[in-house]
Amino acid sequence: MRHYFLLFLLMGFSTALHAQLYEGKKSGFKFFVEVFADSAKVEVFRNYYLYRYEFAYKEGEEILVGQSNTDTLFRGIQNQLYKKKKTFYLKSSFNGKDVFIVKLSDCKYDSRDLLRKKAYSSRQMHQLNRLQDSLSHPNQTEFTDVTSAFYQLNRDSGSFEAYALRTNRCADSLREMIILSSRSAAVDRYYEVGLSLDTADSSEVFKLLENANYQYEYARYFVFTLSQVKPDWLIQYVDKNPANKESLLKNIKNHPHFKEIHQKVKESSMNLNGRKEILKQKRKRNTSNVAVGALSVTIVLAEVALVVGLIIWIF
């Protein structure tokens, strides 16, 4: 009798440890929900181009905790899991705006490992392409093919952890190649001054604005940073009516961070024509159907600081 009782306990313990995997699809997103006795794990992948995937969340996954006295079984910051008529539903939000209600079904094939590998390599490729864009300049003759290098990595064998190590080694090698082939002392100076504008000299800043090629990322970064830290200098430069004023104003008008630039210039107390010309770009922007996401790269100051740090570290 005691043996049956122990067997019953073991069976109950085994059932408690057992997890059920569910999946769902919606609007280019693939959802996986692994349900345990007292929690659930959510992983979401976004299919952004053909067979390329990326992590929908920066952390890659979210753990949901059990709820009591509520219709929601498990809840996290971005996801809620509930059940209606024996069917699981996931209420998932992204950036606090887009909310999806996803109907889940039993997962017939667990493709999470492959999708994790694809998403991890996509994240690395994205960062390296950002690095290459940030360092590019008109005199550059060599460009590193990041995509081809990553496609040579075998995703089919080995664990995700082993694949991540191979990917990291490949990324480190490509990062050094990009910096060695793309590095320019002139471009470096834009980032160096941009990161130390509080102590910069206005004459050097004006010279950098005068020599900038506004088709490149380093110039877009510099204009944005200057507008946030020293908007009066940006206004003064435009007010001087320089030879490249039109290309600078066009850069401001089409900038992915135009809203932030416009706000800082608007807050300035300088009553100069340069300020009016910059603010006027809002009307031109609204009438020219400029898409905020038209630029291939969005500036993130932390990543630019990392670029400069890598340059200093290698050289």
Image (cartoon, rainbow, N blue to C red):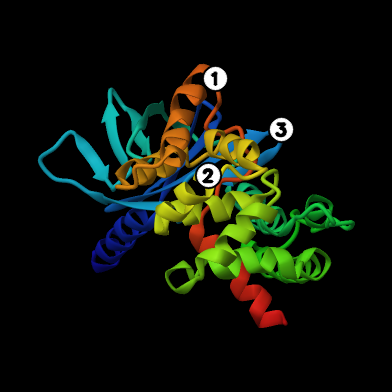
Q: Farthest right residue?
A: 141
Three-letter amino acid code of the residue under disc 1: Asn
Looking at the rendered structure, the number of numbered marks drawn on it comes to 3
- Residue 208 % position (x, y): 63, 59
Q: Which residue is mark 1?
A: 289
Q: Quadrant of residue 161?
A: bottom right
Residue 238: mark:
2
Which tag, 3 or 1, sits closer to the chain's start?
A: 3
Task: Report helix, strand or loop for mark 1.
Answer: loop
Marks 3 and 1 close (CB-CB < 8 Å): no
Q: Quadrant of residue 71?
A: top left
Viewer can see residue 141: yes
Residue 263, above or below 205:
above
Task: Report helix, strand or loop for mark 3.
Answer: loop
What residue is at 52 percent from the left and 39 percent from the top?
Answer: 256
What whole-number distance in Å separates the C-alpha atoms at marks 2 and 1?
A: 24 Å
User: In front: 235, or 228?
Assistant: 235
Q: Farthest left residue?
A: 69
What residue is at 65 percent from the left and 50 percent from the top?
Answer: 217
